[in-house]
Amino acid sequence: PTTPTDLVTETDLTDILPLVARGKVRDIYQLDAQTLLFIATDRISAYDVVMKNGIPRKGTLLTLLSTHWFRLLAAAHPPLKTHFLTLALPPAVPRALRHRAMQVRRLAPLPVEVIVRGYVTGSAWREYCAAGTVHGVRVAPGLRECERFPGGPMFTPSTKAELGMHDENIHPDKVTSLLGPTLAARLTTLATSLYTTAHAHALAAGLILADTKFEFALSPPTPLPIADDPASSSPLPELVLIDEVLTPDSSRYWPADKYEPGRPQESFDKQFLRDWLSGGGMGGVEGGVEMPAWVVEGTRGRYEEVFERLTGRGLGDWIEELE
Ligand code: ATP
Ligand code: MG
């Protein structure tokens, strides 16, 4: 076809490339020992359940938005390295997949989801109400739902669950024991400062970045934890930013002009889909959940609006420019 395909819920390139993994959203193939083809499909998951139908062009949007943030964050935080190599497709890959696939450096992801939260919402709000803590860390009393943390953004990691399992919130100290103190401290500082940069950019576009999830890998690969050894002269391995970055799949974005602590916020992420699901749409999860057209359209519209606000251009214009 001459145009990129609008709806791709599954790819099969196994005739030409070894399949490394299928995630909830991405199909990942190996190009060579150091390089992956990282393809974002239009699959969408909520409460860790993948819907039967997809959101047209969502994968393209996630890929292009990630490249936007990779460029921006690398420029704002030298010498930050990312896994991004190019949007160019290797010759054998169908051209219909263009703009939703990127070539990335293959690395071993650290075993933690690097979540940074600026506001008390979602699972953090539930824990705070029940125990006065967030990921086991005591925070100021008297906060209202969705209020900004008075002490600044919090590093609130979780474990990386296997497909079909739920991630589990963990105390930051757990990361110190998993990675070693020096690496954990560097990870915390880097992730919080990336969040702060992104929060400022989003706010200038009228959006509040409430929280986000980063993933990192080590280059060169290094056994964990890394002991704190003052006698060691070997430098720490480099932290490389991988996966998707600051997309509506990995982040909560709220419209800034409607922000009001003390209640749940309207949002540009999967909340729309989650609300429909928890209102009864979940029905028979066993056979899979099919979103009605209005849920697909509502979700697509929200994703496209956040893309346009953050990049300053509509998805259609962006694709046209790349063609
Ligand atoms: P969700 O994002 O909904 O939690 P998921 O975690 O299954 O789903 P996908 O986005 O479908 O994720 O797949 C991406 C997978 O690729 C993740 O497991 C991530 O850790 C991994 N990954 C990301 N970047 C790299 C990289 N450079 N090298 C190797 N693996 C990577
Ligand atoms: Mg993912």
Image (cartoon, rainbow, N blue to C red):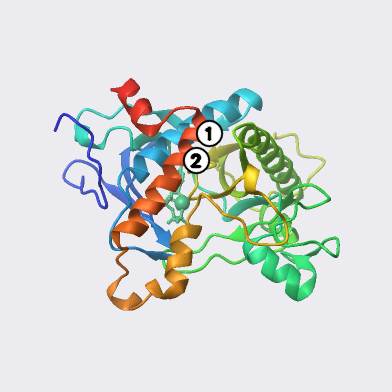
Residue 145 % position (x, y): 71, 62
- Corner quadrant of residue 192: top right
**The residue under label 2 is which amino acid type?**
Val
Residue 54 % position (x, y): 30, 54
The structure residue drawn at horizontal position 74% and vertical position 41%, both measured from the top left corner, is: 189
The structure residue drawn at horizontal position 47% and vertical position 64%, both measured from the top left corner, is: 274
Gap between marks 2 and 1 measured at Cα = 6 Å
Evaluate if marks 2 and 1 touch, with contact meaning CB atoms under 8 Å apart: yes
The structure residue drawn at horizontal position 47% and vertical position 56%, both measured from the top left corner, is: 270
**The residue under label 1 is which amino acid type?**
Leu
Residue 317 % position (x, y): 36, 26
Tag 1 residue: 310
Give SS at disc 1. helix
Which is more toward the observer, 10 or 93? 10
Give SS at disc 2. helix
The reply to whether residue 93 is visible in this rendering is no
- Corner quadrant of residue 32: top left
Residue 198 % position (x, y): 63, 36
Q: Is residue 129 left or right of residue 55?
A: right
Q: Which mark is residue 306?
A: 2
Which is more toward the observer, 100 or 205? 205
